[in-house]
Amino acid sequence: MDEAIPNDIWCLSLLEILNLRRNNFRHVPAATTQLRKLTRLKISHCKMLQGFPELPLSLKRIEAHDCTSLETLSSPSSKLWYSLLQWFKSAKFQDHEAQPKCAGIMIPGSSGIPGWVLHQEMEREVRIELPMNWCKDNHFLGFVLFCLYQDNGTDPYLSYDLRLHDDEDSYEAVRRGWFGCQCDYYPNINSGVLDELWVTYHPKISIPEKYHSNQFKHIQTSFSALTVGDNTESVAEDTNGNVKRRRINPSRGATP
């Protein structure tokens, strides 16, 4: 419950990482919005958590593993999707000078990737046709990417690469994004493998201005799963087939 969290926390105006794991609140405390520098919110294993109210605009990452009561994204009218859209569409992500430029959240994926999401693929890559005049359309804000991942306790890093393609299929690599999934919880022999859903927002403004051209007709996203060994800093691609599906959904809406 909210009263279990010391009130002094909300006075830490320079706080960047907040760990509220294993609490019993039903909603992320509204006072979180007072933390103007907060970039990372850890709320994994909050078994009673149902949703988010307003979120700090400075947030870059939310880790919500194993929040078993959290509302799903089964409908585009769900409260959870509404909260995420308000976060993604905030002025912070539309400002050339602001950081960060992208945002991501990891939530339970037992319901899979929502069926209403467009451009669904089973492979590691997905390619879509860009909307007409995408680079000048002020109502076209960017892309929301969905990745369903099977977590078997290997401390995964998920990453994606964006490439813009022209009519001749020449391409320009424009961005790499990632999400580290380290957690102090590992599935035991009774719980099996956990499905996790990574939802990340890639705003149009984060694509360098030099690529804002109608010569590019398609955008392609490639996903990878990386694992880090317990006692080493080396990173190697996970070859166990853990990444199950990735899907991409254009995000449209009024400019804030």
Image (tube, rainbow, N blue to C red):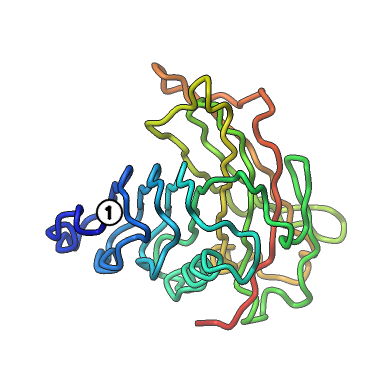
**As displayed, is residue 206 above or below residue 21?**
below
Q: Quadrant of residue 117?
A: bottom right
Q: Is residue 112 left or right of residue 229?
A: right
Number of labels in the image equals 1
Which residue is depicted at the point 50% across and 48% down? 106
Q: Quadrant of residue 2?
A: bottom left
- Quadrant (top left, top right, bottom left, bottom right) of the N terminus: bottom left
Q: Give the SS element for disc 1.
A: loop
The image position of residue 182, as x and y in percent, is 43, 34
The image position of residue 143, as x and y in percent, is 63, 63
- In terms of depth relative to the viewer, which is nearer, 200 or 93? 200
**As displayed, is residue 63 above or below residue 97?**
above
Which residue is depicted at the point 55% across and 55% down? 200
Q: Is residue 39 left or right of residue 248?
A: left
The image position of residue 142, as x and y in percent, is 62, 67
Of all residues shown, which one is farthest toward the right? 168
**As displayed, is residue 30 above or below residue 228?**
below
Which residue is depicted at the point 52% across and 36% down? 157
Q: Which residue is mark 1?
A: 16
Q: Amino acid at mark 1?
A: Glu
The image position of residue 193, as x and y in percent, is 58, 29
**As displayed, is residue 22 above or below residue 118?**
above
Of all residues shown, which one is farthest toward the top? 231
Q: Residues within 10 Å of mark 1 (few under 14, many from 20)?
A: some
Which residue is depicted at the point 49% across and 72% down? 86
